[in-house]
Amino acid sequence: MIVLSNSVAQTLAPGQSATFDTIVSHTGNAECFRPNSGVVRLRCRNAIYNVHCGANIGATAPGAAQIAVVFDGAPLLETTMISQTTTAGDLNSVNRVTSVNTCCCNGGAITVINTGTTEITIGANPLLYIGRVA
């Protein structure tokens, strides 16, 4: 199990991934992470992982801010989080939980990406939790 956060706010262009500079907790060896990156490698094949992502997000201009959890380069549609911003700088809390099944040939990689069309802000102290359950 690994729990990650970031100590400062981030501005992400469309397609850019969030980075994490703080390992809150890490037990076992089912996940691999390099601090200040945005990629968590899932090391176990044929496994099931729970993934929880929560953050305060907002668009840098009035409009929609959108992020999603991405597994091996493909957004997990059930994790798409959208926040309507009426004033630049407003942040709203969003979160999603899902499960990921790895295949027999590799474990895979998890990232959190701005899947929208506008630049967004992710407030300080987002949370990314990934834990192997089977």
Image: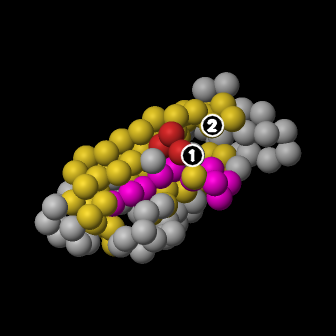
Which residue is depicted at the point 35% across and 72% down? 119
Residue 9 in sight here = no
Residue 49 in sight here = yes
43 on left or right of 130: right
> Horizontal and vertical percent for residue 114?
44, 63
The residue singled out by tag 1 in the image is: 76
Residue type at mark 1: give it. Leu
Q: Residue furthest right?
A: 105
Q: Main secondary structure of the magenta part?
A: strand
- On screen, residue 51 above or below 20: above
Check if residue 37 falls in the magenta segment.
no
Which residue is depicted at the point 67% across and 54% down? 72
| Nearer to me, 66 or 4 | 66
Which residue range is magenta in the image? 65-74
Label located before the other in sequence (2 or 1)? 1
For the residues bearing labels 2 and 1, Cβ distance under 8 angstroms:
yes
Tag 2, which secondary structure?
strand
The answer to which image quadrant residue 27 occupies is top right
44 on left or right of 89: right
Which residue is depicted at the point 21% across and 60% down? 85
Say few, some or many: other residues with alpha carbon within 10 Å of mark 1 (under 14 / 14 to 19 / 20 or more).
some
Which residue is depicted at the point 22% across and 51% down? 92
**Which circle, 2 or 1, is nearer the viewer?**
1
> Horizontal and vertical percent for residue 73?
65, 58
The residue singled out by tag 2 in the image is: 100
